[in-house]
Image (cartoon, rainbow, N blue to C red):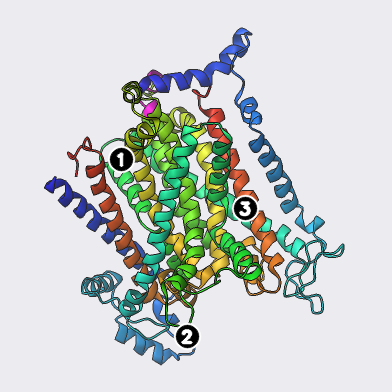
Amino acid sequence: MGQYVVGRLAQSVVLLIFVSILTFGLIHVAPGGPAVLLAPGMSGAQIAEAQQSLGLNDPIPVQYVRWLGHLMHGDLGKSYSQGLDVTTLITKRLSVTLQLLFTALALSAIFGILIGVVSAMHRNSLIDHLATGFSFFGMSVPTFWLGLMLIILFSIKLHLLPSSGAQTLGQPATVTDRLEHLLMPAVVLAVANLAQIARYTRSSMIEVLQADYLRTARAKGLREQSVVWRHALRNAMIPVITVIALGIPRMVGGAAITESVFAWPGMGQLAVDSALQRDYPTIMGITMMVSVVVILTNFLTDLSYLLIDPRVKLSRG
Amino acid sequence: MSTTGLAQHEQEQGTSRAALTGERTKRPSVLQRFAENRFALVSAIFLIVVIVAAILAPVIAPYDPTRITIGTELQGPSFKHLLGTDPNGRDVFTRILYGARISLSIGVIAMLISVFVGTTLGAVSGYFSGWVDSLAMRLTDAMLAIPVFFLLLAVLASLGPTVPTIVIAIGLTSWMTTARVVRSEVLRAVNLDYVLAAELLGASRARVIVRHLLPQALPSMLVASTLGVAQAILIASALSYLGVGVQPPTASWGNMLSDAQSYIFSEPMLAIWPGLMILFTVLAFNFIGDALRDALSPYQN
């Protein structure tokens, strides 16, 4: 067990190094490199001076190792566009993004599993067909457009929910106010993932429901509720957890889009703004930070298999 | 493993053998089974209409998609402007038609790149086991485990958001499913007798892969490509909406929505049409992909 955990941890570190090389490399293949974009109005001499002081004249591997060194100490450099420490800039926004992300993750997992189980129990019924239709919609609808449509409906037409921000400005933040701001973005971010989870839960449940041990459970006289929710779901969950974990990297990308639609003051919005302004230190920092969160979540997911399924083999790793 | 491969092989040979001996197979053809799925049929018709309209855009479209005209801003739907005009006085219907060209081309070309990369990696990794296989699969796992969308933002920020960059960037970050699927199909087929026979006859490795192994993976590749177009269109439209994709004045469904957002309070209808086009197009590709999967699966029904 200990060996497995250490092995998986090592894998995660390798993965992070891979991401860092990829991010750093991609930024530095840009024609002219990052320095030309410091400020469009600078003269040739100023650019040369700036390049010298930022160490941009050193060979790229040297720059990479220096960047990685700073990274280890939590120093992600200075933002080109805002002049602030990227680390400060990001940490302020990380928790705001995580709020959105985890609410959406919880919504999609809870309702996805619920819808999947109910459709599997009533296969080919009206509920099942509706659920399938909803899944296709969820997988096909552009996140940002769904957000815009909900804003039109709930904010502009019905005046029920606020259209942007994480709280009403100029007011002390109350819990209701925060929840009202959180609801639409969280639902929008959850939909695609929810659809995916519902589909996998359904097919996994259908497979498990045909298993012999469930017939035994029924023959024993257990109530159907207990058979489905306690015996079948536990086994059907294993592939579903994989799907939930696999969905996280995509959900993080979705968060960037959702934050832009709802002006949610998180990291995703900052990433998009930085991309538009070619603020490389910020975008590299965010990519790294987000990758750490995602890879950590994957690591924890793998550990959760140990809890949910005692048969999982720990030989590899 | 080998029995499933055999069954699939026989199923694929079924038609030709039936044709030779003159007997009719009881199993309906793939096309018939596909056509039984009404959603897929409607989707196919819808896509054909959209594709034809996109190709014929210069003929059908009543106006210039990019020229800004003064005095015709933000008009409602009329016979002159079927879907009204945008804040720059341009005809929305015209821009949707031209947007279809960009959005569909990006989707299809990005998919071709991702299928090419995925198939190559998957086939090589399935055929040569050992370190080549582990390396390719670790790379696939890595690409699946990282938030690719941020990488796309970084790439487009540094290389600039031109259409070729967008297409290549999306293609190179979405090949993972294809690689996994192709690898497993190749693994399934690589030990079959006819592959061994080809190897014994002295066929080169490249020939064995291309002529004998990849045809086995073709059905799965077809499904993966159809779903791949849907994904690519979604990602490209999101990037364009965020401003790091297709740049104005070129019309794409995504950047039309980003224009529309500034007017969402006064002109909500502007945001509806491009979004519906994305939704229906992506939905159509997803329905077709799903129906193909069912129709091509030898064990259905």
- What mark, if any, has residue B133 been given in the picture? 1
Q: Is residue B133 above or below residue B171?
A: above
Chain at numbered mark 1 = B
Q: Say which residue label 3 marks.
A: B279
Q: Secondary structure at mark 2?
A: loop
Q: Which residues are magenta?
A: B188-195
Identify the residue at horizontal 79%, vertical 76% (top origin).
B69
Same chain, marks 1 and 2?
no
Q: Residues within 10 Å of mark 1 (few under 14, many from 20)?
A: some
**Which amino acid, by three-letter code, is at mark 1?**
Asp
Q: Say which residue label 2 marks.
A: A170
Q: Is residue B9 visible?
A: yes
Q: Is residue A193 magenta?
A: no
Q: CA distance from mark 1 to mark 3?
A: 38 Å
Chain at numbered mark 3 = B
Q: Is residue B75 above or below residue B37?
A: below
Indicate the quadrant where residue A238 lies: top left
Chain at numbered mark 2 = A
Q: Earlier in the sequence, mark 1 or mark 3?
A: 1
